[in-house]
Image (cartoon, coloured by chain):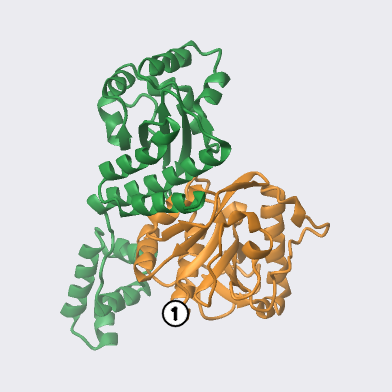
Chain colours: A green, B orange
Amino acid sequence: MGHFDRTLAYIKALQDADTPDAVCQKLLEVTSAFGLTALMAGTVPQPGTPGGKQKDHVLLCDWPGEWLERYVARNYVDHDPVVSRMKQLQAPFQWREAAQEIKPDRDGEIVMGDAGEFKLKDGLAFPLVTVDGRIVMVSLGGEQVEMSGLEFGMISLVSTFAIGRAMQLHTGAVKTIDHVELTPRERECLKWAAAGKSEWEISQILGISEHTSEKHLLNAKTKLGAVNRVQAVAEAIRRGYI
Amino acid sequence: MLYALTTEELMDRPDLWEAVHRLRHSIFVQEMGWSDLYRDDGLEIDQFDHDEAVHHIVIRNGELAGYQRMLPTTRPHLLTEVLTDLFVGDPPSGPNVWELTRYAVAANYRDGRRGVSTVGTELIAGFVEWGLPRGVNQVIIEFEPMWVLRALQLHFLARPLGYQRTYGRQQVVATLLTFNEKTLEVVRERRAHHAPVLSRGYPELLGQRQAS
């Protein structure tokens, strides 16, 4: 099997994974051949987010448990040079490049030194931006990291697919589909309401009773989560229903 | 609204034709640094603006706000002629596979956000809507690796065709995206806009502001 075919096989396996843990495990199977044995991926917490909340931002995690505790407890996220480099939204890079950039910052050096204690001496990191503008940070680390330029590209590509799969699984679990099904009559009444017609006028136009047109508009208002008729019309236009 | 025009139809509209090629020059040459495409007249035009290309155009407030070009893979296209180091093996082709090139959102319509603007998602909804009734269910796109994540979020099936390379100021990976009705549903849900975006008619003259 050629090098690229192997990459495709890894990606296929990731797309078939059906839990975040399985995604994590399959990705690490690929990356551990290059010395990358630990993985952390999640959205960026705002600076100063309390420790308890930081964990809610995690998408995929197989990180030494004690290191994670210390990282959160000491609020390392605000000083980690790898994190600050990712916030600049650059292409994938190696940890050691970020560490070289931050020489003057003592706090940054402490974070990197501490990571070494947990056998996280070097790694690879990159940011991704979702459709809705959230930044996802991906970091892979290990004690002895060895990879060529081509392998570096392969690992970042495969990791991107892993994050994509994790996000699909994540949204599948807490599905927030915000689709409202309006009946044709409800849509028609809303259209006439948008044209400034009263309930009585709508009933005359559509050949229904005033009570019925009132009911259709009331139902539409409830479905659209609007507090009054004006908001219901505005919401229906915004969503492209009328 | 999004309009799908053939090259001939686009050439019948000098105002639009110029706006399209000017937008392409400003984004791909000036912003992204693809200097091979530079022209003194500030219009970016290449050999793939041929009679089978389809131009997708988004108009907002009487201005060109977004653009993408669809090329059939049944004849030479960007991947097979220009970006040949982006694929390994035989690239996919056939009447159901088109190549999406020159995806562009005008600077004023990026909503000042990191994510995908509403014009950007309209272009995405547009090519899916355009493709499905024509039996097109796959597009090849050469984009930044970051877009792989977004494609998966929008329920496309994604498969890379090769490794990423650096072009101009960005990294590019050729990817085959497969889509179906479900994809269109997810894209529309994301946009919170369920009405079709593809218009049957022709856009009005640019500069004619419509009340929106």
Q: Is residue B58 visible from the viewing direction of this image? A: no
**Pointer 1 local density, CA inside 10 Å: few below 14, some 14–19, many at least 20:** few
In screen coordinates, is A82 left or right of B59? left
Q: Mark 1 points at which residue?
A: B133
For the C terminus of chain A, which image quadrant?
A: bottom left
In the image, what residue occupies the spot 69% across and 69% down? B48
Query: On screen, A99 above or below B136?
Result: above
Compare residues B7 and B143 and report the one nearer the observer.
Answer: B143
Query: On screen, B72 above or below B157?
Result: below
* Percent x, y of residue B126: 49, 68
Query: On screen, B93 above or below A173?
Result: below
Q: Residue furthest right?
A: B40
In the image, what residue occupies the spot 65% across and 74% down? B205
Compare residues A179 and A171 and report the one nearer the observer.
Answer: A171
Badge 1 element: helix
In screen coordinates, is B20 left or right of B60? right
In the image, what residue occupies the spot 69% across and 80% down? B8
* Percent x, y of residue A122: 46, 24
Give amino acid for label 1: Pro
Compare residues B201 and A211 and report the one nearer the observer.
Answer: B201
Q: Quadrant of residue B193?
A: bottom left
Q: Which residue lies furthest to the front in this view?
A: A1
